[in-house]
Amino acid sequence: MAISEAGRRTWLVRLREHAQFPWCGIFPRRSGPAREVAKEHAWKMRLDIDMRKENVFGYNAYRTPTFPQFRTQYIRRRSQLLRENAKAGHPPALRRQYLRLRGQLLGQRYGPLSEPGSARAYSNSIVRSSRTTLDRMEDFEDDPRALGARGHRRSVSRGSYQLQAQMNRAVYEDRPPGSVVPTSVAEASRAMAGDTSLSENYAFAGMYHVFDQHVDEAVPRVRFANDDRHRLACCSLDGSISLCQLVPAPPTVLHVLRGHTRGVSDFAWSLSNDILVSTSLDATMRIWASEDGRCIREIPDPDGAELLCCTFQPVNNNLTVVGNAKNNVHVMNISTGKKVKGGSSKLTGRVLALSFDAPGRLLWAGDDRGSIFSFLFDMATGKLTKAKRLVVHEGSPITSISARSWVSREARDPSLLINACLNKLLLYRVVDNEGTLQLKRSFPIEQSSHPVRSIFCPLMSFRQGACVVTGSEDMCVHFFDVERAAKAAVNKLQGHSAPVLDVSFNCDESLLASSDASGMVIVWRREQK
């Protein structure tokens, strides 16, 4: 049913008034068909409100800047009303359709609402309906819904990184002195972070546990599950992957995933943690069920080359991007095992590192010749369009790329963290919507030959300062404050007997895992304040 402009404005006013005065009725006092028409109008206008959420959230937040709990109260009341409406007898199929459309529209308009692995991603994953099950995956290559009315591909507009940075600064600078970043979970995140100095916050009490099931072969990748404090996985060049549970004590290895005939180079958790995807030097990628460790599918590399890295598309976990030893990047549909049409591109060297931005519209890939390429990712079709190239240092392999849309209240620009075998950890600023990079600063580490990786700390955006963690060939784990002008080193963990290759924090930063070239995985416990 079409809604006139005057009717739209009327319902916007009603919904806004209802947000401020929830005891007022949202529907006019009508009965029969007229009331049903009013309800239909309300549901459509609620979609309209969601797609213009700055008008409501921003209006209420800035109108009452001294009351950060105002937005939380609004959200709670609105959720309560949605639950009450759900009990009022509306057809379940209609409600499910509404929630699905709402999630899709919000995802297309704003992208993911949090970084992968952040404390907010669990609730957001429910909104985005991105649970990955093979019977729900779609083949983008043949999906007619990806075509417009005349057979043209639909395109999704790309967000401006310059605008994002300006908005981040404006949000921060317009707040009263001493207030926190205006986000509905800032208080909880600051509480988890400890609200202390970085040096105090990243003091560790020692080793929580040591896993040695992969000893004598390097463990190039270790990762906590998304939004999970106690589930950990690591892959090894012995050809296997271990799924570990840290609680209850003692920590145990739940499953050892076997099937690759050569070393496992990389793996990734899906957003809902129900599957893992792994890449191997045997030129295959495998899909695993995390619950029981069974292999769901084996997919050969389209070029028959060694697969060196992989990452999920953050909005649609049906798509996985892989990089291989023949210098190619491929977007793969893991439900069909097919390469997505238009989803391939060639780099100047072997592809060693991949990373998406949070909305999934930009992809960066690094190779062993020292180049980083940015690609525009078409959300409707999975097509890659090469945008920019940066030569970090000719001949220095790019071994790790980590992306963050907002590092901290002080560092409000989208950023990339790079390891490049230069005995430095590099922090770049993303300056436009095509992924152009500008060097912000560097930190001294030892890395000249090993594939060392680094990460942003998951809770860094909600405290003063911002911390990054990296492995190093000096057998230590290093912490750096990216905003400290001098003496940026925050902490150093010693205990490995070989170069540290990868590090991973759990969602609340209570545990840190690190892996090394000898196959040892150490889980470190942070001091409790």
Image (cartoon, rainbow, N blue to C red):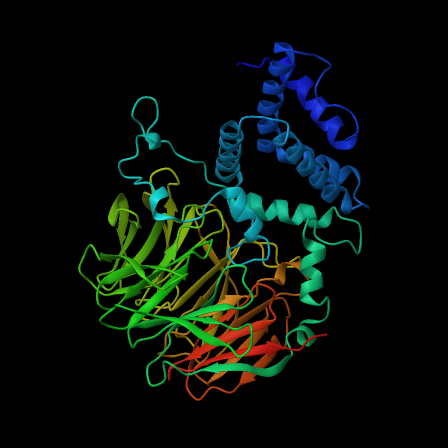
Depth check, front residue: 128 or 162: 128
Q: Position of residue 291 (x, y in %)?
A: 41, 61
> Is residue 350 something that shows in the picture?
no
Q: Residue at x 53, y 72 (%)?
A: 469
Answer with the quarter of the image where residue 466 lies.
bottom right
Give x and y (percent) for residue 489.
60, 77
Q: Quadrant of residue 401?
A: bottom left
Q: Is residue 167 above or below residue 179?
A: above
Q: Is residue 466 visible?
A: yes
**Residue found 62% across the figure and 20% down from its top:** 39
Residue 54, compared with residue 357, is above or below; it is above
Q: Position of residue 424 (x, y in %)?
A: 47, 74
Residue 194 location (% of width, % of height): 71, 68
On the picture, is 151 further left or further right than 83? left
Q: Tell me the quarter of the image containing the C terminus.
A: bottom right
Please indicate whether residue 120 sits to the left or right of residue 218 in the image. Answer: right
Q: Residue at x 63, y 31 (%)?
A: 87
The answer to whether residue 37 is left or right of residue 271 is: right
Residue located farthest toward the right when viewing the structure as drawn: 66
Q: Is residue 69 left or right of residue 289?
A: right
From this view, report whether residue 40 is shown above or below residue 408.
above
Report the label total. 0
Locate residue 249: give its quadrant.
Answer: bottom right
